[in-house]
Amino acid sequence: MSRDLSALRESYEQAGLRRADLAADPVAQFERWWDQWAATAPYDPAACVLATASTDGQPSARFVLCREFGPAGFVVYTNQESRKGADLAANPKAALTFGWLELSRQVRVEGPVTVVDDATADAYWSSRPRGSRIGAWASHQSTPVADRAELDRRQAEAEARFGVTDDGDPVERPPYWGGYRIGIERMEFWQGQPNRLHDRFEYRPAPDGAWTITRLAP
Ligand SMILES: Cc1cc2nc3c(=O)[nH]c(=O)nc-3n(C[C@H](O)[C@H](O)[C@H](O)COP(=O)(O)O)c2cc1C
């Protein structure tokens, strides 16, 4: 039986987004909004949805944590032998969407994807808690697992190999684990407004190194 959710209806009453408010550069604009979002949502503020597509055109989307942003793009880390990794190896383009609902905001990023260099990935890897690093060895992300016991067994094997407590022995970065950088070919800032007349601004790179900003119909 289907469930009717049509009566759930928010009215978006936050201040509007005007062209005069916008930074000339989308990363600067993102930074402003990021600071406001991080102050609003202390729980996993860096969560965002990464969409990829296979070569036969099947899209798939999943939450990830954005670990860095800047003029060179937005960085996420994952198992590169996962479904998303297979998609990106064959079709290195992605979309990343931040849903900042408590502020009635959405930010969309689209662009070409490159693999983060080893030194950067190593630096992030070594900042992760030891348990997460061991877990990355135990999980062949996106492949079938017979049952929970198999997962626990793999975790125990990885713990035996590396040691649970940090005795100075490094847990090396698995060869299949690393980062993807989503370059900025398009960014969009969406501010919910009353009567569904939302504010949308799209940034695209202009040939002279600047950005063109276009208001889009909601
Ligand atoms: C809030 C949240 C954050 C997540 N962050 C990551 C992440 O940074 N990297 C990652 O590989 N998976 C992350 N996941 C798990 C992914 O959503 C997904 O299950 C996993 O990467 C496998 O996706 P795939 O089979 O499409 O490759 C996160 C899930 C949630 C709900």
Image (cartoon, rainbow, N blue to C red):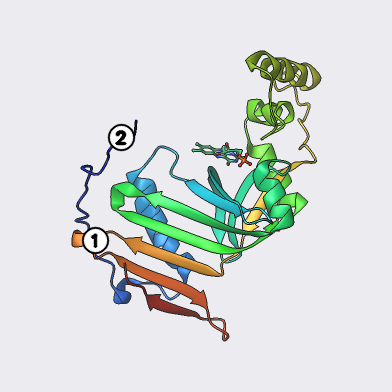
Q: Amino acid at mark 1?
A: Arg
- For marks 2 and 1, give the one nearer the viewer: 2
Kindly identify the residue that appears in the image at 49 percent across and 65 percent down.
27
Which mark is on residue 3?
2
Kindly identify the residue that appears in the image at 65 percent across and 46 percent down.
84
Which sits earlier in the primary sequence, circle 2 or circle 1?
Answer: 2
Left or right position of 7 against 22: left
Kindly identify the residue that appears in the image at 19 percent across and 52 percent down.
11
Residue 17 point in image, percent of width and height: 28, 67
Please say whether residue 180 is visible from this viewpoint: yes
Task: Give the secondary structure at mark 1.
Answer: helix
Residue 50 point in image, percent of width and height: 55, 50
Task: Give the secondary structure at mark 2.
Answer: loop
Quadrant for residue 114, please give it: bottom right
Left or right position of 202 against 148: left
Q: 129 above or below 74?
A: above
Residue 188 point in image, percent of width and height: 43, 66
Left or right position of 70 against 167: left
Q: Amino acid at mark 2?
A: Arg
Asked if ligand 1 lies within 8 A of label 1, the reply is no
Location of the N terminus (image quadrant) = top left
Farthest residue to the front: give it: 1
Left or right position of 142 against 74: right
Quadrant for residue 130, please give it: top right
Residue underneath mark 1: 196
Please say whether residue 78 is visible from this viewpoint: no
Q: Residues within 10 Å of mark 2 (few under 14, many from 20)?
A: few
* Residue closer to the observer: 2 or 89: 2
Tell me the CA gap for discs 2 and 1. Answer: 24 Å
Asked if the residue at tag 1 contacts the one at tag 2, i.e. Cβ–Cβ closer than 8 Å, the answer is no
